[in-house]
Image (tube, coloured by chain):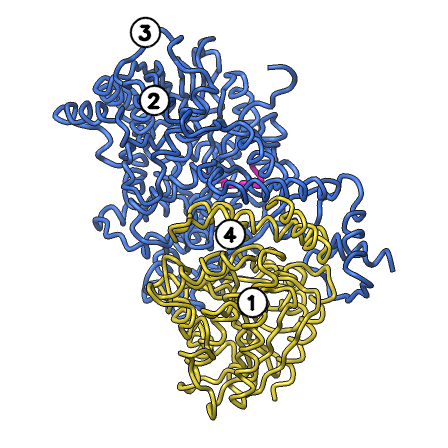
Amino acid sequence: MMAASNEVNLNESKMVVPLNTWVLISNFKLAYNLLRRPDGTFNRHLAEFLDRKVPANTKPVLGVFSFDVIIDRSTSLLSRIYRPADGEQPQLNIADLEKPVTAEVVPVIIFFHGGSFAHSSANSAIYDTLCRRLVSICKVVVVSVNYRRAPENRYPCAYDDGWAALNWVNSSSWLQSKDSKVHIYLAGDSSGGNIVHHVALRAVESDIEVLGNILLNPMFGGQERTESEKRLDGKYFVTIQDRDWYWRAFLPEGEDRDHPACNPFGPKGNFLEGIKFPKSLVVVASLDLIQDRQLAYVKGLEKAGQKVKLLYLEQATIGFYLLPNNNHFYTVMDEISNFVGSDC
Amino acid sequence: MNKRNHQDTSGGAGYGGIRKSDFQSKAKIWEEGQDAGGGGGVDELLAVLGYKVKCSEMTDVADKLEQLEMVMGAAPNLLRDTVHYNPSDLSGWLQSMLSELNNSPNTFHDRMLQSHHIDDPLHVPAESSSVTTNSQQQQFETTQSSRIYNDDSEYDLRAIPGSAAYPQTQDRERNQKRLKTSGGSNSAPPLLPSSSPIVGVAAAGTVSEPTRSIVLVDSHETGVQLVHTLMACAEAVQQDNLKLADALVKHVELLAASQAGAMGKVATYFAEALARRIYKIYPQDCLDASYSDILQMHFYETCPYLKFAHFTANQAILEAFATASKVHVIDFGLKQGMQWPALIQALALRPGGPPAFRLTGIGPPQADNTDALQQVGWKLAQLAEAIGVEFQFRGFVATSLADIDPSMVDIRPDEAVAVNSVFELHPMLARPGAIDKVLSSIKSMKPKILTIVEQEANHNGPVFVERFTEALHYYSSLFDSLEGSGLVPSTQDLLMSEVYLGEQICNVVASDGADRVERHETLSQWRVRMGTAGFELVHLGSNAFKQASMLLALFAGGDGYRVEENNGCLMLGWHTRPLIATSAWQLIVSDSP
């Protein structure tokens, strides 16, 4: 019986994405199942072994080069910087890497990779590739933060690292636009989207201005099971069970999913009325089982009088943005370009 | 329209290009994806993400994923202790899991029965017939690992790298006691292979665009001006503008003196090397061998690179030697023999008893004519005797590996041979024909396994400034790791390690021709060379990876060190910059066994 319904599920997800996308995401699903243990521990060694990583490359490839910077030695916090190569330069030296940006206005996107707080790194191939595409399509500088992961490092480590990165970017003079300010946007997918919200929140009380938040399939949750979770459980690569596992791994021990980190507009959430919160672009995939939570997040921002644009993508699954072989990828890239280009 | 879709799904522009496409429906995309690429092409979009899947195999790979999904759904714990190899080869990876599921013992009861066949490792069998067969061995080890394997357990490292490697006589009893308890259920023989290696195809076609990666410290420590001046000096040297070069090198020395941290030290060594090149004061041909050994010992103690090299090479050797009753290791650079105590100890713990172990150690002539090789051999013999491993040693003095005549090495027909080279192959690139001669010699030794550890950098390019730049980045990361690893080595250890690296820097920058021996090349480059020479890769798997990672946590102190898997090989790096790479090879199996 169980086998039969599994078959139906597998066929469904196969119908909505290209085959190579299906293979990629199913591969992750399989690998991730091997890594999560029922007792809440994580097979980190195997995770690092299986993760496909790429080094930074100061030789421009398709107009983009990258290099790594240790932002904070005490936590080994590293970020990978991606910049558009200007003109003819065949190779860049250390001296050139942090050369001041030259355009009038250069949007700097601080990017937080996904992985449900436990998986992936800034140098994971999927995210290195995504960041390169962001640079070349949206004409931005990207700073991809290698934040500490759960379960070894629970809340609020990821947020602390995001905050450290924000401060570092803000004080990097070579990233300033002509108005002597760094034009900062926060972006992230899955857990990265969640981090975007919380880092932006922390920035509110500081003198660091975040111009906009970009949340791609952001990871939110709550104690109650929502309709979309029940309806889509196990159908498109993701299960309620695995979501629960990741929250248990990230949240402080003993906390439930109404903790504000997980459920920012829930019963224990923060009030955002009247504060200067950045404008938000929130992308929700219609086949993502946590969409009810993501839509509730958008509603929460609206009710607090904050500027938010929702991009609801029909027939999109998680991870659609990892391969540029579908319409949604290009739609999102266009939206991001406009979002950081308009600066309003 | 079709053509555009075709291009988009198989991705001519690796990073996805900037063209939009009009897709009519998602079902159509799926079909296009299937047809795109046709014959032997690899799906380029997945390739960029680190996965090699032939377009023609995509459906088959999807099927495998579905099969595994169903099995995992029914019995999620079945693959908990699998050893994984080469995840980039998706098809192979999936297949190996499917095969494992088909082969594993069916009941828990069966597993328990098998676990009672643990032999007392001190009881060395007289005949090789008592050694278990391969498949039994495999099942036994699966049993061991499934009962004992626990990431959080105290990792009882039998390998004791470092100066404690040669136990004094009072340790003999302790060793014997330790070995006696290893037969019990709490021992985890960490260096034993968990399963036979899956042989992969030599990645001859994977030479990627050369990358240049850097890990930087935070801006205010990089010494941008310092680097700028160094680069300008190198340019001046290349253009033979020696007057300018001289002025610049003096300026570098000034700046370096006031530059804090690793960058200042690295700059000083590079400046000195540049000065030598400018004034044509070339360093002596080769360091006194015993002096360079001492330097390397300090380097060994200070940071984990050599320990990693030895450890990972030993893993591969142990797997290759799994069932052999007579084994012979040929070490291309014996030095102080630091790699071998751990191997001897691991062999001693082998279920069924240790094999007879012969070691041939090769080393350069000593200035004072002492027989350094024999001294090392003797110490190893003492250790082997203390733990009950039959041991024979032979030393060979050779100025160059290319001088070795394979017939001199005395390979016996019934022994499994391993050839081991830690940083010994790249010097062969300094003289034409030498590397080919060496690889040919190795082939005639018919090794079961050839382990190679090399620096992960291209310091052998023809253009001086490029070499210089690569080396500057490489050694900056290395020095940074010495500085930032959180260890507090004795000042002497640290200083000597820096001198050790400084000698290399000097050679890369100031020497040329046959004198320039530090001709490091990247793993990608070695893959091509080895493939052409008739070798294929033996994959290092997740067990070796895990154990190397755990070793790092124990001995490396700082958590900037990272182990990375790269198409069947393992690399050790500082943060995101790989610095050394271990690979294992065997002769390409042509036809029948």
Q: What's the magenta bit mostly, secondary-structure-wise? A: loop
Q: Report how far apart the C-alphas of labels 4 and 2 lie in the structure.
A: 43 Å
Q: Is residue A217 magenta?
A: no
Q: Is residue B369 left or right of residue B404?
A: left
For discs 1 and 4, the disc positioned in front in the rendered view? 1
The dot on residue A290 is 1
- The chain letter under disc 2 is B
User: Which color has been applied to chain B in this rendered view?
Assistant: blue
The dot on residue B126 is 3
- The chain letter under disc 4 is B
Q: Label 2, on which residue?
A: B350
B238 in relation to B157, above or below: below
Q: Report how far apart the C-alphas of labels 1 and 2 lie in the structure.
A: 51 Å
Q: Report how far apart the C-alphas of labels 3 and 4 lie in the structure.
A: 54 Å
B560 in relation to A338, above or below: above
Amino acid type at image mark 4: Glu
Residue B340: x percent and y percent? 32, 27
Does residue B191 appear anywhere in the picture?
A: yes
Do residues under tags 1 and 2 come within 8 Å of each other at their CB atoms? no
Toward the left, the furthest residue is B170
Which one is nearer the viewer's eye here, B330 or A121?
A121
Amino acid type at image mark 3: Ala
For discs 4 and 2, the disc positioned in front in the rendered view? 2
Q: Label 4, on which residue?
A: B470
Residue A227: x percent and y percent? 58, 69
Residue A244: x percent and y percent? 46, 60
Q: Report how far apart the C-alphas of labels 1 and 4 lie in the structure.
A: 47 Å
